[in-house]
Every structure is written in structure tokens, then in C-alpha cells.
């Protein structure tokens, strides 16, 4: 449909990332925004620290349990349409630090992810490839099919709490079941 | 005079701004609009001599990668045997710091003893830290580090656990991306072959 | 049974003085240093600081010995590393009990001990009696257990040491999520239930803020003071650091950093890794300067191995380390200008030069950032063909010009001067007492540079100066960085001229390295300060204790003091001038 093409075209040309650099991949993300791999060519030079004004959250770096409530809160505060790119091995699955006691093994345990980019850290060009992959996905999407335009408003993801270990409220039933076993 | 320092700063920025256009014009006079985007121009712009715009217009332009560059491991497919050179010695699995290499050693169906090839070889690329220790210590020149970085997926399951089919790449590819390494390898093999003949 | 290790001359000197003053309280330790009785610790420490000149406490940590060692029973051991104006460390060991007798806190003798003792309590559960604020620093209040104890296992625990047997020869891939009952990296105490439970992790953070409220009220007006959070997600480019500040208007009355948002368990993972397997992990500590971290670790392990590095490898190491220093200072200046509001301009200029240097690293080691280049006894691979001409062009022509340009851009700028001169002044005595190192210390007038006071590698063969400035404010810290870049270029010019031919690795390439039993504190001057590795080996293929003393973690201890009385905007400038990288702070 022509309005969908217009909708998708305008989204592709002005995707504003959230400044959510966590660890080493954040340096490559900054390099992707810097002069050599200028992301202003893609309309993405408006990097917003405030989640209310951002469209894309690039989770670049290890998500630790201490940071998990903040990541979920940031995701909830972003306004739709919102997308998440898991950049780097740590964001995909915990990466080399997977066995750590303070590491969440993949940001998709907390928030839904749209594109995964492996690498430790992925080159800035690999990150651009991820942006292009995201754009390509939009070419296949229809407005009616989008998650946030469906019936039943999105309540937001419950924020995990810090207890004897990270407490993910969505797992509360499972924890109770394992205790009784 | 108050403000002199600020003017000095602005002169630096102005100088750079003007330089980008001066540099562009230089390339234009050399041969038209297209000249600025040629690989030769990219090499100059990306070197210490570059004065103008430093940007690499990805995806239209790509930076050439040095030979030593490492993204993920790949298995070298020997054209003569049609199989990889891997002897399933397990060195890479032992030396990998995050332990993301999984190897099942094959057994010889006739004798039932372990065979010198892998039945299964998996690398979990979502854990791999691209350190290159596996390729560095591989005694059979089987595992080498690849240059391919344009990899994305939209589902985690099944996208990043690479088996032997996905990891195997032909010897010609290895020779293409690692010319010096390949030449040294061939020289070593010839020397070994010559010694064996004697 | 280890033979009687001969104590170093320094330790022997301290031992004789202390034995005379405090008979019965001091004895030689198993490998290195002295064991002090806990009840005399504070007196011994005060004597060491005031009379023997050990004014600089570099690191406080702990080691868990659940089984008796050759000379001492099972214990939790607190370990302190002290330094004088020159020379190596004096190591003190104090024995404590698991869940029992603690150790007196030395935060009153050396304020530097404050953050380190909190971390030791957090990780090992050694209670420091008399510490002003003993709460967890990297994890949160309420976390179950002390992770670095040998009997504490993480949820994804597979075995004590790598390599794991499950990978070969019958290595059917099994994701860690599929092995655990909850399908994720979480474990709870068996008697705990989430029903009706509320998190108390934030309570102690804010409770600290109210403690000082009573004394600081201004008498003229009754205005409220407000507690705000800067971070953990914020526009500054330093990483996820949270600062909790109590403000009176815009003026900071009290500021506390809350750390641990990037705590990636380097030390626990380091104990599981092999010695060689730790090298790529050190890249990820201070992720901007990976070569320096490699250097520190390699230097420390080579002390234990007793291996001598060939000359060409030493030159290559110095070239890489100094290029890293130039790159780090450029990035520090660029990020600083980004944070104070120049936004992208100077940051892009600095990052452009960084890209050219990083091209060199990519050519030599294979990766832009995570270089994994150093090995025990040398470097991993030789410099490729195009490296030297490119390096020479950068070092002789390009970088000096760009450093001059960046200086012209910033130094006389009235706005820059107004924001930085007189802000965050750190007096030299306080800097030493808080264990600050690096440009932060040298800008306060203390000419302490590890490359000069305890030379490692071949730094004593080059002609270079230690850069010192005397005002101790933010402006001076940046001037020190500009000058240090010039000194690094000076060293680079000499190294590139004199680079000899020869082997790049002592002996053969080895994957399974066995390090003889012992302990060592090896340190290097990383661009941010003193980076030290305290390694304890029991003769095996994996470290027994792998402790990283990072400059950013120690330097952050002084942030609260520096920011008191300044405006919120100055906090950003002060934090940028300390130049922290969160990967290093939280490990």
C-alpha cells in the first residue's frame, strides 16, 4: 500500500537511537556515530539520552543483573514504534561473561529484540548492516500487523527487582513450582 | 582581548570545514565526480595523509580488512579430500576461553577406535569473543579466523550455533584472505614433504 | 612443600623494624610479605605510614583458603599492598575467619582503603570492623552470598576449572540455559519465596544521603535539599555509572557513586580460566586501552614464570603501550569536551585520530579494540609489512600536528578555561592518601609514574620526562594529558628508530601454561593510572586468585570529596577529568 511505503520510508530515514551504551560495544557504537562511519547519513545522528524521544535502543554491552531493572524501565519509557538491536555477544547471550553471577544471559530474557548482531565487538560496519537489516524488515511489515496497533494495550514489561538474585516477576510461578519440588 | 580564545577555536573548526571542500575539489579536478568515491581515493582519505572528509560511505564503500583480522573461526575445506583438515584433537575446545567450541570425535566404524576427524563440530558464535586462540593453536592448520562481519539474525534460536556445514569454507577462500599465512603454510608443507621423501 | 621463599630486601627491612616495635605481631608470610596479627593491625599500619614512609595504599583485597596451606591454617586472608616513593610493594596479610572474626578497618589510616574494603566485604565476606560504611559496592544489599568464596557457585557453574570435560571428546552442544532448573542465570536460596517480598536494595543508598542532613542546613533560609540520581543511563560517555547527589539548589552537598552496573565477574571467571585464557578477558577491562591491560597481566605472570622477554618483543610492547596512551588521552579529551557541551566537534576530531591508531592495532593484532596481542614471554605475532611506515608517518607527522591543533582549539578558549580552572582541586596529600594514580595524581604535583618508580620492560632505556602540574584542578589534568601525549610521541620516535630484529616470543608457543606456585603483584602505568594484578598461583594451570587493581576504581574514591561544594555541571567536568572507564571500575 502506498501509505505503508511512505510510512516505512520515513521511518527508515529518521531512526533516532537511544544512547544506551553499556560496555565495550558502546565504544564501537560511538565510533559508528563518529566521523568515519557517520550515522548522520542514515538520519540517525540525533542520539537522544532520553528514552521518551528515541526510537531505537541499541543494547551495546553486557546487561548485568544490577542494570536489568533500568534497562526494562528504559524500554517501557520508550514510545512506540520502538525497536531493539542486541549488539554484540554479551547482549545476545551474555557472551564471554555468560557464566558470571551478575550477568543476564542475553537481553532478550528481559525485553523483545528485533535484530541480533554477533561479534565481540562487532565492527561499526556490522552495526550498519544491522540497521539495514532492520530497514529490510520494515519493508515487509504492514501497519495493521504491527505489535503496538493491536487490540489490548501494552502494559509494559514488569520491572525486575534486586533480591537474593535478580527477581524476574514473570518467573514467579516457576520459582514457586521449583521450591515445592 | 576577551573572546580571542574562542575565535582561535572557531578558526580551527572553520579550517577543517573549508578543507573538506578544498579536498573534494582536488579530487573533482582529477577526474570528475566519480573520482572521489574510487578505491584509490578511499585509500588516500583513510591514510594519515587524508585531509578532507574521513567518512567511509558504507554500504557503497567498504574498508579493506588487514590479513590478521579476526571475526569468527572457520574450517578449511581441503579440495583434495573434500573434507576439512580437522583431526578432532580438541586443542581448540580446550584453549577457547569462554568454552564455546563443542567437538564430538568420530569413531572408525570398522575398528571402533577414535578416528582423526570430527563427527560433530559446533561453535557457539553468540559466545565467541573473537580472540583467535583456537586458530592460533590449531596444529592441523584447519581452523582459521574469518573476515566476514556482516552477520545478523532476527531470532536467537538456531542462528548462532554453527555446525561443520556452516563453518567449512574452501581452501581457496583461506588463500584469498590470508595470503602471507597461506604462502608460509604451503612452504612448510613442501619442506615437510621433501623431508619425508628423503 | 614450597621451600622457604627469601623475602625481598624491602620486606626484610620492614620486618626487622616492625618486629622490634611490635614483638610477636609480625611474621613472614608464605610467599611474599608479612603476616600481621589483627589486633595490632592499626598500630602497625600507622607506623608504616608515618615512620617507614608507606603513604600510598594501592590495593586491599582478600583470598579464600578453605584448606590449610603449608604454613598457615584455613582462613580468609585480607591482603594489603603498600608503596613508598619508589620501589616495589610491601604486602601485608591478615588472617580472618569465615563468618567469624573480622579485621580492623584501615580506612582511618589510608582513606584509599575505603572502597577496596567495601569490595572485599562484598566479594569475600571479610568484615572490616570500624569501617565508616561497610556495605556492598559491586553487588546490591540483599544478594545471597559472597561470590569469590571457593564454596560459592554461580548458577551456570559447571566445574571448578576450564577446560570443561563436556566440550571434548563427547561435546554435544548444550546451552547453559538448558542445564539450569529455571532456564536462566538465576538461583535463589531454597527457603526464599517472591510472594509478599519487596526489594530493599535501594534503601541503604538513600539512607546514606540523609545522615549528613542534620548538620548542613543553612541557617538563613529553610530550603529543602533534594537527592537526585545522575545515571546510570546518562548522556556522558563514560559508561553506566550512577551518582547519587544531595543538592542544595544546584550546589552539591554530598555525592556518592553507586557502582556495579557493569560488574561482569572478571575475578571469578578469571579463577576458572586458564592462565592464557585470561589474556582476552583482560582486553575487556579498560576496553579503550586493551594493549595496556594485556601488558599488565603479561608483566605480572612473567614475574611468576621467571621468563625473560626478547628485545624485539619489548620494543613492540612499548610501541603498542605508548600508542595506546596517545589514543586514550585523545579519547579522554574528546569525551570530556563532548560531556561539557561541545557535543560532537572535538570528539570527532579525537576519534578520527583514534581510528588511524586503531588501524595500526588492527593490522598487527587482528582487532580494533580487543587486541589479545601479548603472550607470556613476548607478543603473539610479528608486525606485518605495512606497520612501520604507517606508524612512522602517524608518529612523526600526523599526530603531533593534530595534538597541536586540539590544543589550539581548547587551551586558550575562555569558556573551557572558565569551566575547568579552579574546579575540582585535589591537594597532593589527599591525592596520595586516597590512592589516586595517573594524570589525576600528577596534576596535583606528585611526580609518581610507575614507569619511573618501578621500571618495567625497557622504559628505563628511553629518554622521557614525567609530566607534573601543580594546581590540581580540571584544567591541569587536561594539560598533563596533552603533555603526556607529547612525551609518549617522544618515546615512540625513539622506539621506532631503535626497533631491533629478532624473535618475538621467548621459547615456543604454549597453550597450557603451568605457573609455579607463588604470588605476585605486577603493575604497569596504564593511561589512567596504576593497573596492578595480584596473582596467587598454587602451581596449576589456573590462577588460584586473580585480583585486578584498576586505577579507575581507586580514583573514584575521591570523587565525592572533589565534588562537594561544586555545581552539578562541574560534576561532569570533574568526572571526565578523572577519566574512568566503567569496564575497569566494575570489572
Image (cartoon, helix red, strand yellow):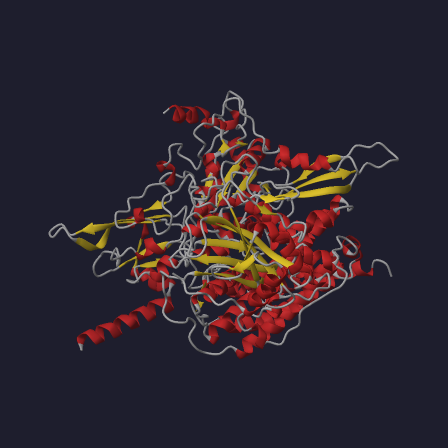
Q: Is residue C119 left or right of residue C412?
A: left
Q: Residue at x 35, y 52 (%)?
A: C163
Q: Up-down: is B154 above or below C530?
A: above
Is there any visible trace of residue B44 in the rendered image?
no
Q: Position of residue B10 (x, y in %)?
A: 75, 58
Task: Tell which of C130 and A44 is nearer to you.
Answer: C130
Count of number-bearing discs: 0
Q: Up-down: is C369 above or below A109?
A: below
Q: Residue at x 51, y 68 (%)?
A: C317
Q: Is residue A181 left or right of residue A69?
A: left
Q: Residue at x 48, y 79 (%)?
A: C500
Task: Tell which of C547 and C495 is nearer to you.
Answer: C547
Quadrant in the picture for residue C217? top right
Q: Position of residue C495 (x, y in %)?
A: 55, 75
Is there any visible trace of residue C566 in the rendered image?
yes
> Which residue ends up furthest to the top in the rendered image?
A152
Q: Up-down: is B41 above or below C499?
A: above
Q: Position of residue A140 (x, y in %)?
A: 45, 35
> Which residue ends up furthest to the right in the rendered image?
C220
Q: Position of residue C458 (x, y in %)?
A: 54, 73
Task: Tell which of B21 and C529 is nearer to you.
Answer: C529
Quarter of the picture holding the N terminus of chain C = bottom left
Task: Tell which of B15 and C360 is nearer to you.
Answer: C360
Quadrant in the picture for residue C190? top left
Amino acid at each position: 500500500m502506498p501509505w505503508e511505503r511512505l510510512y516505512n520510508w520515513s521511518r527508515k530515514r529518521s531512526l533516532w537511537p537511544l544512547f544506551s551504551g553499556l560496555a565495550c560495544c558502546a565504544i564501537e557504537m560511538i565510533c559508528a556515530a563518529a566521523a568515519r562511519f557517520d550515522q548522520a547519513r542514515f538520519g540517525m545522528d540525533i542520539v537522544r539520552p532520553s528514552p521518551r524521544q528515541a526510537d531505537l535502543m541499541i543494547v551495546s554491552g553486557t546487561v548485568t543483573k544490577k542494570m536489568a531493572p533500568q534497562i526494562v524501565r528504559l524500554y517501557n519509557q520508550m514510545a512506540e514504534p520502538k525497536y531493539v538491536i542486541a549488539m554484540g555477544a554479551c547482549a545476545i547471550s551474555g557472551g564471554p561473561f555468560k557464566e558470571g553471577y551478575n550477568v543476564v544471559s542475553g537481553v532478550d530474557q528481559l525485553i523483545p529484540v528485533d535484530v541480533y548482531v554477533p561479534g565481540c565487538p562487532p565492527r561499526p560496519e556490522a552495526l550498519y548492516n544491522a540497521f539495514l537489516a532492520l530497514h529490510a524488515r520494515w519493508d515487509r511489515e504492514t501497519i495493521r500487523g504491527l505489535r503496538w496497533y493491536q487490540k489490548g494495550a501494552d502494559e509494559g514489561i514488569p520491572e525486575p527487582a534486586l533480591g537474593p538474585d535478580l527477581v524476574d516477576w514473570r518467573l514467579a510461578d516457576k520459582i514457586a513450582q521449583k521450591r515445592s519440588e | 582581548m576577551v573572546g580571542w580564545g574562542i575565535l582561535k577555536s572557531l578558526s580551527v573548526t572553520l579550517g577543517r570545514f573549508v578543507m573538506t571542500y578544498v579536498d573534494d575539489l582536488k579530487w573533482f579536478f582529477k577526474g570528475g565526480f566519480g573520482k572521489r568515491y574510487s578505491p584509490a581515493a578511499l585509500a588516500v582519505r583513510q591514510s594519515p595523509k587524508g585531509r578532507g572528509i574521513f567518512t567511509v560511505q558504507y554500504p557503497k564503500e567498504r574498508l579493506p580488512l588487514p590479513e590478521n583480522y579476526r571475526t569468527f573461526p572457520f574450517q578449511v575445506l581441503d579440495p583434495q579430500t573434500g573434507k576439512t583438515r580437522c583431526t578432532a584433537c580438541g586443542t581448540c575446545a580446550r584453549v577457547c576461553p569462554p568454552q564455546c567450541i563443542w567437538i564430538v570425535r568420530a569413531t572408525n566404524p570398522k575398528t571402533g577406535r577414535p578416528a582423526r576427524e570430527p563427527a560433530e563440530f559446533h561453535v557457539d558464535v553468540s559466545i565467541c569473543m573473537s580472540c583467535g586462540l583456537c586458530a592460533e593453536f590449531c596444529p592441523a592448520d584447519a581452523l582459521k579466523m574469518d573476515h566476514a562481519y556482516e552477520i545478523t539474525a532476527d531470532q536467537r534460536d538456531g542462528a548462532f550455533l554453527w555446525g561443520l556445514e556452516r563453518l567449512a569454507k574452501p581452501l581457496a577462500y583461506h588463500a584469498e584472505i590470508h595470503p602471507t599465512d597461506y604462502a608460509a603454510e604451503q612452504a612448510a608443507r613442501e619442506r615437510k614433504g621433501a623431508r619425508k621423501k628423503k | 612443600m614450597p621451600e622457604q621463599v627469601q623475602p625481598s630486601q624491602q620486606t626484610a627491612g620492614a620486618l626487622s623494624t616492625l618486629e622490634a616495635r611490635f614483638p610477636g605481631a609480625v611474621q613472614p608470610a608464605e610467599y611474599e610479605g608479612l603476616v600481621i596479627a589483627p589486633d595490632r593491625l592499626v598500630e602497625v599500619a600507622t607506623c608504616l605510614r608515618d615512620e617507614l614512609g608507606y603513604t600510598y595504599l594501592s590495593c586491599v583485597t582478600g583470598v579464600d583458603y578453605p584448606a590449610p596451606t603449608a604454613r598457615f591454617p584455613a582462613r580468609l586472608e585480607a591482603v594489603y599492598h603498600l608503596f613508598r616513593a619508589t620501589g616495589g610493594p610491601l604486602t601485608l596479610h591478615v588472617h580472618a575467619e569465615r563468618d567469624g572474626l573480622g579485621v580492623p578497618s584501615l580506612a582511618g589510616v589510608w582513606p584509599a582503603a575505603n572502597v577496596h574494603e567495601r569490595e572485599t566485604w562484598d566479594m569475600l565476606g571479610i568484615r572490616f570492623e570500624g569501617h565508616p560504611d561497610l556495605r556492598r559496592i559491586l553487588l546490591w544489599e540483599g544478594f545471597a552470598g559472597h561470590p569469590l568464596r571457593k564454596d560459592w557457585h554461580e548458577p551456570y557453574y559447571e566445574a571448578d576449572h576450564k577446560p570443561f570435560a563436556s566440550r571434548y571428546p563427547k561435546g554435544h552442544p548444550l546451552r547453559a540455559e538448558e542445564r539450569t532448573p529455571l532456564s536462566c542465570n538465576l538461583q535463589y536460596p531454597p527457603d526464599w519465596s517472591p510472594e509478599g517480598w519487596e526489594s530493599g536494595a535501594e534503601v541503604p543508598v538513600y539512607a546514606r544521603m540523609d545522615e549528613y542532613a542534620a548538620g548542613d542546613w543553612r541557617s538563613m533560609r529553610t530550603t529543602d535539599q533534594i537527592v537526585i540520581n545522575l545515571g546510570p543511563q546518562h548522556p556522558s560517555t563514560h559508561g553506566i555509572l550512577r551518582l547519587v547527589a544531595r543538592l542544595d539548589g544546584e550546589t552539591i552537598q554530598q555525592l556518592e557513586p553507586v557502582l556495579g552496573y557493569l560488574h561482569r565477574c572478571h575475578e571469578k571467571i578469571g579463577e576458572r580460566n586458564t592462565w592464557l585464557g585470561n589474556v582476552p578477558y583482560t582486553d575487556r577491562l579498560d576496553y579503550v586501552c586493551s594493549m595496556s591491560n594485556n601488558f599488565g597481566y603479561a608483566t605480572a605472570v612473567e614475574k611468576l614464570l621467571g621468563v625473560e622477554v626478547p628485545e624485539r618483543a619489548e620494543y613492540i610492547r612499548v610501541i603498542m603501550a605508548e600508542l595506546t596512551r596517545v589514543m586514550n588521552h585523545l579519547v579522554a579529551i574528546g569525551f570530556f569536551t563532548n560531556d561539557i557541551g561541545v557535543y560532537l566537534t572535538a570528539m570527532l576530531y579525537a576519534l578520527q585520530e583514534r581510528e588511524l591508531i586503531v588501524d595500526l592495532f588492527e593490522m598487527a593484532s587482528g582487532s580494533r579494540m580487543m587486541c589479545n596481542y601479548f603472550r607470556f614471554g613476548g607478543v603473539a605475532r610479528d608486525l606485518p609489512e605495512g606497520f612501520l611506515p604507517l606508524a612512522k608517518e602517524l608518529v612523526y607527522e600526523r599526530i603531533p600536528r593534530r595534538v597541536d591543533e586540539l590544543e589550539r582549539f581548547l587551551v586558550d578558549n575562555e569558556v573551557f578555561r572558565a569551566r575547568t580552572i579552579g574546579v575540582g582541586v585535589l591537594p597532593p596529600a589527599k591525592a596520595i592518601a586516597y590512592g589516586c594514580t595517573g594524570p589525576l595524581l600528577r596534576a596535583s604535583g606528585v611526580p609518581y609514574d610507575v614507569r619511573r618508580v618501578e621500571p618495567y620492560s625497557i622504559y628505563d632505556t628511553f629518554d622521557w620526562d614525567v609530566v607534573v602540574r601543580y594546581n590540581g584542578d580540571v584544567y591541569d589534568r587536561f594539560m598533563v594529558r596533552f603533555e603526556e601525549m607529547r612525551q609518549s610521541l617522544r618515546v615512540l620516535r625513539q622506539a621506532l628508530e631503535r626497533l631491533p630484529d629478532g624473535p618475538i616470543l621467548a621459547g615456543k608457543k604454549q597453550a597450557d601454561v603451568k605457573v609455579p606456585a607463588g604470588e605476585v603483584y605486577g603493575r604497569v602505568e596504564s593511561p589512567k593510572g596504576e593497573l596492578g594484578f595480584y596473582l596467587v598461583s598454587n602451581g596449576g594451570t589456573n590462577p588460584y586468585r586473580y585480583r585486578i587493581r584498576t586505577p579507575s576504581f581507586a580514583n573514584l574514591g575521591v570523587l565525592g570529596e572533589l565534588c562537594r561544594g561544586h555545581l552539578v555541571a562541574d560534576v561532569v567536568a570533574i568526572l571526565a577529568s578523572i577519566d574512568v572507564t566503567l569496564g575497569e571500575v566494575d570489572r
